[in-house]
Amino acid sequence: MFQLIDRRLNGKNKSAVNRDRFLRRFKSQIKGAVARAVKDRSITDIEHGEKVSIPVRDTGEPTLGHAHGGVWERVFPGNHEYIKGDEIERPDGGGAGGSGGAGQGGEGEDDFVFELTKEEFLNFFFDDLELPNLVKTQLQQTVVMKPVRAGFTSDGTPTNIHVLRSLRSALGRRIALSATPLDELNAAQEHLDELLESEDEHSPEVHSLQSQIRLLKNRLMNIPFIDPFDLRYTNRVRVPSPTTQAVMFCVMDVSGSMDEYKKDVAKRFFILLYLFLLRVYERIEVVFIRHHTQAFEVNEDEFFHARDTGGTVVSSALKLVKKTIEQRYSSADWNIYVAQASDGDNWDSDSPQCRTILGEELLPLVQYYAYVEITEGEPQNLWFEYEMVAQRHAQFAMRRIKTAAEIWPVFHDLFKKTPMHAGG
């Protein structure tokens, strides 16, 4: 029997060609493992690699060997059970894949397990979304430095003099330097007053005290009001500007009309947006808000798996987003992005209120607002209200998604004109 093995050199990574061939061969099994990982993973942990298990039955390699031609017979010594024409059962392979119950016989092998790199994982994750080259389409990150106050220093330029601090330092210096001469002056003045009551003002001792008092007064007058030593300057250091940090709000409708399929589509859209922003900003914070008739800020697990449901009041979520921005994410320091996913169903009386809140209160605070409506039917009342907002605000975009295959095209369409937004 002969086996052919490709041993050709491939630079530093000698197994690159064989690994690519292996990934192509087991593409369906790997995609299944990646799909399971996406379902169970955290959004912010989606970029890491993944361990993939391949059943041992799928790893067999074709071989070349010599065989006897035609029909032929053999005699096996020690055979006491079978005669010519008997069919022999296949041996039990109990234990293959590391599973199965205990038994007296049988044999097997564990599944073949290997680990995908981060790049390979992303390629397989985006494969069904028609996005094999997301990394190549990323925007260039621009880090801008800005000066910020960092206390005070005794050295600087005249334009940075801090008058109050300088005067405070001068006052402290004058008090310290004049304390001893002032005590001596007061003591000498009291002694002089006592001598003038009992002695003549022309006595030598009186003249001596008067000379000492003049010297002390001159000493006090010679203490400068302000000295170069007293000057204090505002100290400024350069730090990365807030354009390198962003917060992403994930807003999802969890009313009774949002089934598990729609939630899964929404999750994949949020993953895309997170990965997109992560390649532009150094720091990303994710805020999860789910709503039905009321809105709540929750962690990621509750965001996708909590079972509470009810009617739909979208304005409750928009109000909570605005409140959270005002309390924790100042628009002067953060680049704010909002992604909202819904099936479009909303109370008729609430949709006009959503249009007002979004257009007049939220959009002036955010860099970009993306709304996706996940439905196969006709647009709902919320869609028509949001259309009025989209006509007046360039940083607001809205699209409809019917199936998971449309996620990437819709995502690309939403963000194809955002270089200036992503740059901060």
Image: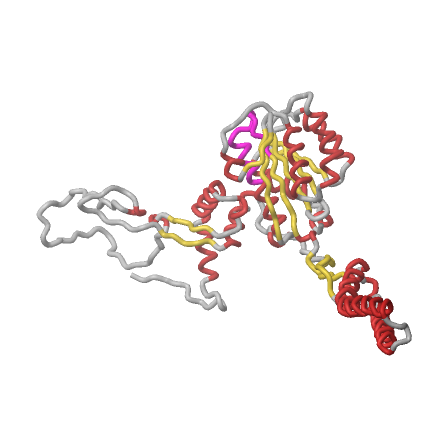
**Residue sitting farthest toward the front:** 198
Q: Which residues are magenta?
A: 252-269
Residue 370, compared with residue 219, is above or below; it is: above
Nearer to me, 417 or 160: 160
Residue at point 74% right, 35% down?
361
Query: Does the rendering let one see residue 306?
Result: yes
**Residue sitting farthest toward the bottom:** 204
Residue 281 picture location, percent across and down: 64, 52
Is residue 256 magenta-colored? yes
Is residue 395 magenta-colored? no
Nearer to me, 84 or 396: 396
Residue 328 picture location, percent across and down: 65, 43
Nearer to me, 370 or 2: 370
What is the image's colouring?
secondary structure
Residue 161 picture location, percent across and down: 81, 62
Residue 246 picture location, percent across and down: 65, 48
Q: Quadrant of residue 215?
A: bottom right
- In the shown orientation, is residue 330 left or right of residue 170? left
- In the shown orientation, is residue 337 left or right of residue 115? right
Residue at point 77% right, 64% down?
175
Number of numbered markers? 0
- In the shown orientation, is residue 75 left or right of residue 177? left
Query: Does the rendering let one see residue 375?
Result: no
Residue 183, compared with residue 282, is above or below; it is: below
Nearer to me, 335 or 210: 210
Quadrant of the image containing the N terminus: bottom left
- In the shown orientation, is residue 179 left or right of residue 200? left
Residue at point 67% right, 53% down?
244
